[in-house]
């Protein structure tokens, strides 16, 4: 247990008082209200960090706060930057917020700028520019930085923060900031993060290092490995912020692959081997009824092609009036000798499917199939581009996850499609969501990708209330991008 001193308690109270008097919340329904510390912020973050002193000076020089998403890490850190700019003024002081990208680092910096503009006194005391905040009386400055240790060697921060340590490739930037503030009498570095996707990385290294450092403080809020991740009581325990509701957490539990939910909202690194698998095998198994395809009703075909030394998948998807996606899959493998896909065989299948079923759209990743698409389009097949960009694959991946979790797929137990789906991993793409990816380069996921493409378009067509998209000159009149 931390041992608090009278001087330390006074320092901690000063932070609390500053936040209530001069800082405003900047988001949602709390925007404009005083920044009053939550009990967990006060008891587990501010008090242990500021409440311990040695000879009147702050004992803690380094702090690591690990908290699940939505629990106010960025806002608290922005408030601390302002406190150290105005509440503990340092003449010629330097402050930096850094992350792996300038865009990520700017989250805290831009929040601080808005907080300054919301308070007349802070606004009068400072000059707020696009890339720097300057306190006029002290000359202290605050900037956001990308992860670049080479350019940080000349910096001597009085206060600094590092955002999302778990994605940093090494600790060089942290070390640069910590060593740069050696000459600062009460310099403080604060690292904030959620759990890592895999164990053994930079975050684990920093936690171990600082857990054994008397001048460092580590606070970790989250579930334990022995906790049941499906238990709402565990969700509540891991997320102490009063503004997080059970409905919010339940929606995330239903929308995210379990390992992603565990990491983001339980602050728990998934066990090795489970960290990136996208789909639950039991949920997929429960979707194993035989599909029923009506030859008269519209359907969508998705094609994921890998012409060289890999598999190519074609998936047909027909959404029925009950919202169930009836799917069939075909796979092709590159010729083992030539190492290339037989394009004629692929074209023959697509022609055959188009002649047999009422195919409204054939969506294809154009990366490898320009010539095939052009030929089939000139023949009148409804072929169109579906580039596998993040903006396309994130909603497609998440839609497929929802369909499987809700039991709205019938696949008939197709062994190859099952293998591809259960091989698929989930790659987070902050802040938008996640997309399908390979867990191992040796495991094929082409069927899962083609199914995600087809089911996304089929669901979107149905949601828009149109089953007959018109095509003129090989160009569809409506491009659905959710």
Image (spheres, rainbow, N blue to C red):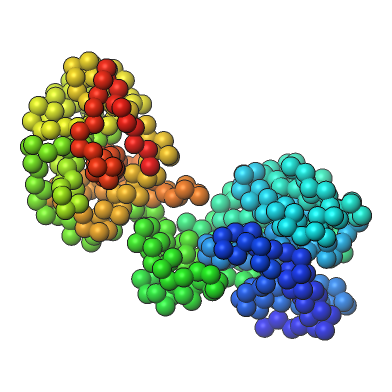
| Quarter of the figure with the C terminus | top left
Q: Is residue 297 above or below residue 33?
A: above
Find residue 207 and report its horizontal and vertical position in percent: 61, 65
Would you identify the image quadrant in which residue 406 lies?
bottom left
- Residue 445 seen anywhere in this rendered image of the structure: no
* In-front residue for pair 9/189: 9
Question: How many numbered dots are placed on residues in this image?
Answer: 0
Q: Residue at x 24, y 31 (%)?
A: 469
Q: Is residue 356 above or below residue 56?
A: above
Q: Residue at x 80, y 74 (%)?
A: 14
Q: Is residue 444 above or below residue 277?
A: above
* In-front residue for pair 222/242: 242
Q: Residue at x 37, y 31 (%)?
A: 387
Find residue 392 and report its horizontal and vertical position in percent: 38, 38
Q: On the picture, is 15 further left or further right than 286? A: right
Would you identify the image quadrant in which residue 279 lies?
bottom left
| Quarter of the figure with the N terminus | bottom right
- Residue 197 seen anywhere in this rendered image of the structure: yes
Q: On the picture, is 218 further left or further right than 230? A: right
Q: Residue at x 42, y 58 (%)?
A: 260
Find residue 200 and report its horizontal and vertical position in percent: 52, 58
* In-front residue for pair 26/16: 26
Find residue 24 and report its horizontal and vertical position in percent: 69, 63
């Amino acid at each position: 247990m931390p041992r608090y001193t009278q001087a330390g308690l006074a320092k901690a109270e000063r932070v609390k008082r500053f936040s209530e008097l001069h800082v405003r919340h900047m988001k949602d329904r709390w925007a404009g209200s005083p920044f009053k510390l939550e009990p967990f912020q006060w008891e587990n973050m501010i008090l242990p960090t500021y409440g311990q002193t040695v000879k009147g000076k702050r004992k803690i020089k380094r702090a690591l706060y690990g908290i699940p998403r939505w629990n106010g890490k960025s806002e608290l850190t922005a408030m601390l930057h302002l406190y150290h700019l105005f509440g503990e003024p340092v003449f010629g002081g330097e402050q930096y917020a850094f992350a792996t990208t300038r865009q990520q680092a700017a989250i805290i910096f831009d929040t601080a700028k808005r907080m300054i503009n919301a308070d007349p006194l802070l606004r009068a005391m400072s000059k707020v520019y696009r890339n720097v905040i300057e306190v006029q009386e002290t000359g202290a400055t605050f900037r956001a930085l990308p992860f670049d240790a080479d350019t940080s060697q000349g910096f001597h921060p009085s206060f600094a923060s590092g955002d999302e340590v778990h994605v940093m490739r090494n600790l060089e930037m942290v070390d640069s900031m910590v060593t740069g503030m050696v000459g600062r009498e009460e310099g403080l570095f604060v690292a904030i993060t959620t759990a890592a996707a895999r164990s053994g990385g930079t975050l684990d290294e920093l936690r171990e290092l600082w857990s054994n450092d008397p001048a460092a403080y580590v606070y970790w809020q989250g579930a334990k490995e022995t906790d049941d991740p499906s238990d709402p009581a565990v969700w509540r325990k891991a997320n102490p912020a009063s503004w997080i509701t059970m409905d919010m957490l339940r929606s995330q539990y239903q929308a995210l692959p379990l390992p992603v939910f565990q990491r983001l909202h339980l602050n728990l690194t998934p066990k090795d081997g489970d960290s990136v698998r996208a789909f639950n095998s039991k949920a997929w198994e429960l979707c194993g009824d035989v599909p029923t395809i009506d030859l008269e009703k519209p359907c969508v075909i998705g094609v994921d092609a890998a012409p060289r030394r890999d598999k190519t998948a074609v998936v047909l998807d027909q959404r029925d009036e009950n919202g169930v996606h009836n799917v069939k899959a075909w796979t092709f493998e590159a010729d083992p000798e030539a190492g290339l896909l037989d394009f004629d065989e692929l074209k023959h299948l697509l022609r055959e499917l188009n002649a047999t079923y009422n195919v409204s759209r054939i969506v294809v990743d154009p990366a490898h199939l320009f010539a095939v698409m052009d030929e089939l389009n000139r023949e009148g097949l409804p072929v169109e581009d579906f580039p596998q960009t993040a903006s396309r694959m994130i909603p497609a991946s998440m839609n497929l996850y929802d369909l499987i979790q809700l039991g709205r797929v019938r696949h008939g137990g197709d062994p190859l499609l099952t293998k591809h789906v259960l091989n698929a991993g989930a790659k987070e793409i902050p802040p938008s969501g996640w997309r399908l990816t390979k867990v191992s380069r040796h495991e094929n996921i082409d069927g899962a990708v083609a199914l995600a493409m087809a089911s996304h378009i089929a669901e979107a067509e149905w949601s828009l209330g149109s089953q007959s998209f018109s095509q003129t000159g090989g160009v569809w009149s409506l491009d659905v991008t959710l």
